[in-house]
Image (cartoon, rainbow, N blue to C red):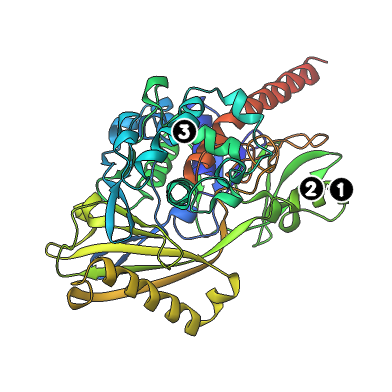
Amino acid sequence: MKDEVIIIGAGVSGLSSAALLVKDKIPVRIFEKSPKVGGRTTSTSYKGHILDNGFHIMPFYKTSAVYKVLEEIGIVSDLKLSIVDDITFFQEKKFHKYPKGILDFFRLSIVPMKSRLRLLRILLPMAFSSMEKAEELDSKSLTKITKTMDKKTRSFFDAVCMLAFADTPDHVSLGEFVRTIIRANPFKGGTSEFGYPSEGGYDKISKMLEEYVKNNGGVVSLSTPIKKIVIQNNHVTGVVLESGEFFPSNCVIVSNPAYIAVKKFFDDEVFDKKFLSKVEKLNKTTSVIEVHFCLSKKIDFRQIVFPVGSNYTAKGVFFITNIAPSVSPKGEHLLMAGTPVPSEYTDNPQKIREVVDKMKVDISQIYPDFKENLLWERPMAWKLVEAVVKEPGLVWKQKMPHHIEGIKGLFFVGDSTISYGIGTDSAAHSSMLCHPKIINHLKEKSEQEIQIKQN
């Protein structure tokens, strides 16, 4: 049908857009190339355990964009969450508690006592700043304020950046860091708590959104890749599937990374070279090696531990069973370790093995009984993981716009488009920001069709 909105991709952003639309009684059809929903948050079952595709988390809990989407469509109470707030840093053979509030900074053992006051003088103005003020800092690197600090104080920023962005301070915009501190400030309605589905598997969120879309008249077509988005006279007219079947529509929403979509789904003449060059600058990805470990013994009561320092290969150790016990069979314990790597490592089994072995050494240094209780391990390597942050100057409003001037009915959502936040939160935030633009377009098309009929 002509007024059916077509959405490409059933990840968090595509499903969020679909859910917001069907709530407004607008018919949607989602095409997803994979056999299940979730996109980069897809989970799998392995030896009775639920394994996530990477470690995903709902940041800032009730203030997160994901939470707000579920709240907007009235199903947030259906999502049972485990709160993730037992987070520590490990440095120089000691565990250091992650600060959850202003008072915690006075007890911040990872930073020397003499440096804590200086750190507070930096972080307090950030926490009580505004999003508008943060935007003025988007072109500056976080290292602008950290480069003159002592090594131990800088290690605090290293740890927070790994927690919030899965990256290092030199890649992080000062504005993006300030936004993160604002969103964690309880005095401005923020929180330092994070959430993860109690039943296990972060794709539980996507499955809930899929069910809502279907229950409200939407169609979700899995294992159905798109070949082409058709543009005629600067208007979207529909999509062509890989099978060759054509589906007409005057509104198409793309949730794939924008710099991939503009080269994959369109004829060459649709976009000019200047625009394509601008979009290509957003092609900032990272490559990651992650490994799930199953243990016969619980080696820590904490939920997340971040090893701090260049001597550690593992940049994060996530005790999944401590967060959600249901991810594993009784008596077994699941944890995940991960680290960013050069992209060529992901195609090299020997390099993957070397990195995994180094992470095992790291974990054994922290937990001496790790290896003797190891039942199995399952490495994964990801070459093209969308970078959580691009780089200073390519964040928030400097990213890909939701709508391209001059082309009617084409919209882009997802964490490569205008949005702030980390990971899935950025994807959901993008969908929320784009939704009013989509509604305005559909209203204009409806008014035009009524005028044509009247004439």
Q: Amino acid at mark 1?
A: Lys
Q: Earlier in the sequence, mark 3 or mark 1?
A: 3
* Side of 413 relative to 266 (left or right): left
**What is the secondary structure assignment of the residue under circle 2?**
helix
Front position in the image: 218 or 181: 181
Q: Is residue 411 above or below residue 383?
A: above
368 sits to left or right of 393:
left
Query: Residue 219, percent across and down?
Result: 50, 43
Between tags 3 and 1, which lies in front?
3
Task: Write down the residue under mark 1.
Answer: 274
Please say if the residues under marks 2 and 3 sit with CB atoms less than 8 Å apart.
Answer: no
Going by the numbered disc 2, the residue's amino acid type is Lys
- Image height check: is 287 above or below 202? below
Q: Nearer the viewer, mark 2 or mark 3?
A: 3
Element assignment for label 3: helix
Q: Residue 367: x percent and y percent?
A: 23, 67
Of residue 279 and residue 389, the one placed in the foreground of this image is 389
Q: Is residue 425 left or right of residue 227?
A: left
Which residue is painted at 52% across and 39% down in the image?
421
Q: Are marks 1 and 2 in contact (CB under 8 Å)?
A: yes
Mark 1: secondary structure: helix
Q: How crowded is the residue under tag 2: few (<14 C-alpha within 10 Å), some, or many (20+)?
A: few
**Mark sitting on residue 181:** 3
**Where is residue 422 drawn, in percent x and y?**
50, 43
Q: Residue at x 67, y 29 (%)?
A: 136
Q: CA distance from mark 2 to mark 3?
A: 29 Å
- Spatial CA distance of label 3 from label 1 is 35 Å
**24 or 140: which is nearer to us?**
140
Which residue does the numbered mark 2 point to in the structure image? 278
Q: Is 119 situated left or right of 197 in this image?
A: right
| Lower sequence index among marks 2 and 3 | 3
The quarter in which the C terminus is drawn is: top right
